[in-house]
Image (cartoon, rainbow, N blue to C red):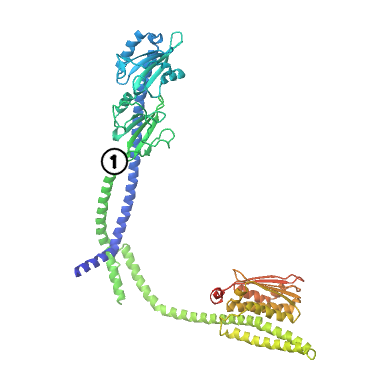
């Protein structure tokens, strides 16, 4: 077990070593590079193979098309020469028969018969093979050549043509006919000369073409019906009907596919297909090569290249191991040894500087670094002491600024809260003096208000300086409390109040800090009305919006409140600063002699000051 543990530890150390990672990194880089090279080589070989296949296809197409043209050219020459022979122009059967039989026998590999259908409806035909008795065919009673497709087509065109494939009348087989109109010496139409060729005989001629790499030839008419199909293994079969070519999907191609990779429906693998259209017949000539056969040479080349690259990687790995031991690992071992000595407290340990390569430069820089660290250690205590003193100085300055900020905050709260209370006391005192000895009830009410404002001022002062013992306490009807407080103050000067609240339940559930800020702002706005506005009516609107608590405070006084803000006193300017510091919105409109309109939005803070959700439970 101990031996296995040692082996595992050594293997882990080996895999973690710089040499192993360096060698693996280099080999991986080389492997990636060679893989990319292999991929590019394969693409190049593939393109080359496809290009060779294209050239081979064009060569086969050219050879096959020349053979087809030569074949039909010979048929045309034979037809034209016979059409000029007097025996055919004057319809002399006893002279036509030996000429026709001699021509058919001379071309029996592909000619079946030659005949003349006259303008009077007579048919003179002689040939060899099935359907002939003593070289003469047997026709059904009433046979009229003038109704046959080959006759009608020749009369329409007026020159030599190759007919569409059709079923012969004298034998149940498909074939084509080379036809040409025949005219007498006087130019009068005599009839149509026809030369019959079985499609099976034409297929034999095409099948004689041997194509390398397993290529196949397909000959189609203009309706994509099969004339010759080397994919069909049934040789020697006499065709009695034409079948539509469905092995390859030709509907997606306009005309002929040229240089396309196509998958046959009933065969495995892909084929490289090229096509051309024969000018003589209008037929399509397709040549198809198996894609696997085309790529065989490319794959063999790839295997050879992959083998060579594998051998190269192995040789490089061995070379890198040898070079890394002598050039990298030995200097690194010395460096690690010196670092270990320094960690153990031997500060005199240094790397040898006897080499002029990168490791020699590294040794010199390392030794200089050790000296620098030692010097740095001596100066570090001094810098720490200086920075500690600077930090204490900053802390003292921060404390001083915080005290100033707290002083300004308390001063603002004193102005808004106690200022409002003192204003009420002053107004109540004035009314009480006027009622002294005249109206005891008013005097009593004013003294009660003075007492109430005095006690509330004391409570506000305690709350500002020390906070409240129950910070999360909830006022049962905060909206009603605010309205009653403002109305009582405005009534001292006979000012009417229009007070409206939306979402009063949510307003009652505001946090303590938000309620405190809102109450102090309304107190200060009410004090400004009592002191400066000379208003007869005040309108107050409170709503809870998504962005916070909305307050609209409007009076019909003398306006001009913007001047008060410009002076920078602790009135509206203090309210504006406080609202903006809380992240709220402050809007003021106060034209001269047109009243004052103030809109304030206070954000509802998260945490302790957010709207309490308990009322929804």
**Residue 325 lies in quadrant:** bottom left
Pointer 1 local density, CA inside 10 Å: few below 14, some 14–19, many at least 20:
some
Image vertical order of residue 614 relative to residue 36, above or below: below
**Residue 177 lies in quadrant:** top left
Image vertical order of residue 237 relative to residue 143, above or below: below
**Residue 435 lies in quadrant:** bottom right
Image coordinates of residue 316 in percent, x first then y, are 26, 54
According to the picture, the residue beneath numbered tag 1 turns out to be 296
Q: Is residue 202 left or right of residue 608?
A: left
Position of the N terminus by quadrant: bottom left
Give 325 or 557, whichever is nearer the viewer: 557
Image vertical order of residue 253 relative to residue 93, above or below: below
Give 424 or 472, whichever is nearer the viewer: 472
Give 568 or 61, whichever is nearer the viewer: 61
Image vertical order of residue 221 relative to residue 507, above or below: above
**Residue lying furthest front:** 141
Q: Is residue 550 left or right of residue 214?
A: right
Position of the C terminus by quadrant: bottom right
Image coordinates of residue 95 in percent, x first then y, are 35, 8
Res. 68 in view: yes
**Residue lying furthest bottom:** 437
Q: Secondary structure at mark 1?
A: helix
Image coordinates of residue 442 in percent, x first then y, are 76, 87
Res. 570 in view: no
Image coordinates of residue 199 in percent, x first then y, are 34, 24
């Amino acid at each position: 077990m101990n031996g296995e543990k040692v082996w595992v530890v050594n293997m882990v150390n080996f895999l973690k070593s710089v040499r192993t990672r360096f060698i693996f990194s280099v080999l991986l880089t080389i492997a990636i590079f060679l893989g990319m090279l292999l991929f590019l080589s394969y693409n190049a070989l593939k393109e080359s193979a496809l290009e060779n296949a294209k050239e081979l296809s064009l060569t086969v197409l050219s050879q096959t098309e020349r053979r087809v043209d030569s074949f039909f050219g010979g048929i045309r020459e034979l037809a034209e020469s016979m059409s000029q022979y007097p025996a055919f122009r004057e319809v002399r059967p006893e002279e036509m028969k030996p000429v026709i039989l001699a021509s058919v026998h001379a071309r029996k590999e592909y000619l079946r018969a030659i005949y003349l259908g006259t303008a009077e409806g007579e048919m003179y035909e002689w040939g060899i093979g099935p359907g002939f008795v003593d070289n003469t065919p047997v026709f059904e009673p009433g046979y009229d050549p003038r109704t046959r497709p080959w006759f009608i087509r020749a009369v329409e065109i007026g020159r030599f043509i190759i007919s569409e494939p059709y079923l012969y009348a004298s034998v149940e087989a498909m074939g084509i006919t080379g036809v040409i109109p025949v005219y007498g010496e006087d130019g009068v139409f005599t009839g149509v000369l026809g030369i019959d060729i079985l499609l099976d005989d034409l297929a034999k001629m095409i099948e004689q073409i041997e194509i390398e790499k397993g290529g196949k030839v397909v000959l189609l008419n203009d309706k994509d019906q099969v004339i010759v199909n080397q994919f069909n293994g049934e040789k020697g079969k006499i065709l009695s009907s034409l079948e539509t070519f469905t092995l390859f999907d030709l509907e997606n191609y306009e005309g002929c596919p040229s240089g396309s990779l196509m998958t046959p429906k009933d065969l495995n693998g892909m084929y490289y297909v090229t096509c051309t259209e024969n000018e003589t017949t209008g037929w399509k000539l397709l040549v198809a090569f198996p894609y696997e056969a085309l790529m065989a040479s490319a794959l063999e080349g790839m295997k050879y290249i992959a083998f060579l690259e594998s051998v190269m990687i192995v040789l490089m790995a061995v070379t890198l191991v040898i070079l890394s031991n002598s050039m990298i690992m030995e200097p690194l071992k010395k460096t690690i040894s010196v670092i270990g000595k320094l960690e153990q407290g031997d500060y005199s340990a240094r790397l040898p500087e006897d080499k002029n390569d990168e490791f020699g430069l590294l040794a010199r820089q390392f030794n200089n670094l050790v000296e620098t660290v030692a010097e740095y250690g001596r100066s570090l205590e001094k810098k720490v002491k200086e920075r500690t003193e600077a930090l204490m100085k900053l802390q003292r300055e921060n404390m001083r600024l915080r005290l100033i900020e707290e002083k300004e905050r308390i001063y603002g709260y004193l102005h808004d809260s106690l200022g409002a209370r003192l204003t009420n006391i002053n107004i109540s005192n004035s009314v009480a003096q006027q009622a002294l000895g005249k109206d005891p009830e008013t005097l009593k009410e004013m003294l009660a208000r003075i007492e109430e404002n005095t006690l509330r001022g004391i409570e506000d002062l305690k709350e500002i300086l020390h906070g409240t013992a129950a910070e999360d306490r909830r006022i049962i009807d905060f909206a009603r409390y605010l309205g009653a407080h403002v109305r009582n103050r405005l009534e001292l000067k006979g000012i009417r109040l229009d007070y409206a609240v939306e979402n009063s339940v949510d307003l009652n559930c505001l946090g303590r800090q938000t309620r405190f800020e809102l109450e102090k702002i309304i107190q200060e706005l009410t004090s400004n009305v009592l002191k400066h506005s000379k208003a007869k009516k005040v309108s107050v609107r409170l709503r809870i919006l998504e962005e916070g608590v909305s307050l609209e405070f409007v009076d019909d006084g003398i306006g001009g409140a913007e001047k008060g803000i410009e002076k920078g006193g602790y009135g509206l300017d203090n309210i504006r600063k406080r609202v903006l510091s809380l992240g709220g919105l402050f809007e003021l409109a106060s034209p001269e002699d047109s009243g004052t309109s103030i809109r304030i939005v206070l954000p509802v803070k998260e945490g302790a000051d957010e709207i309490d959700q308990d009322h929804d439970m």
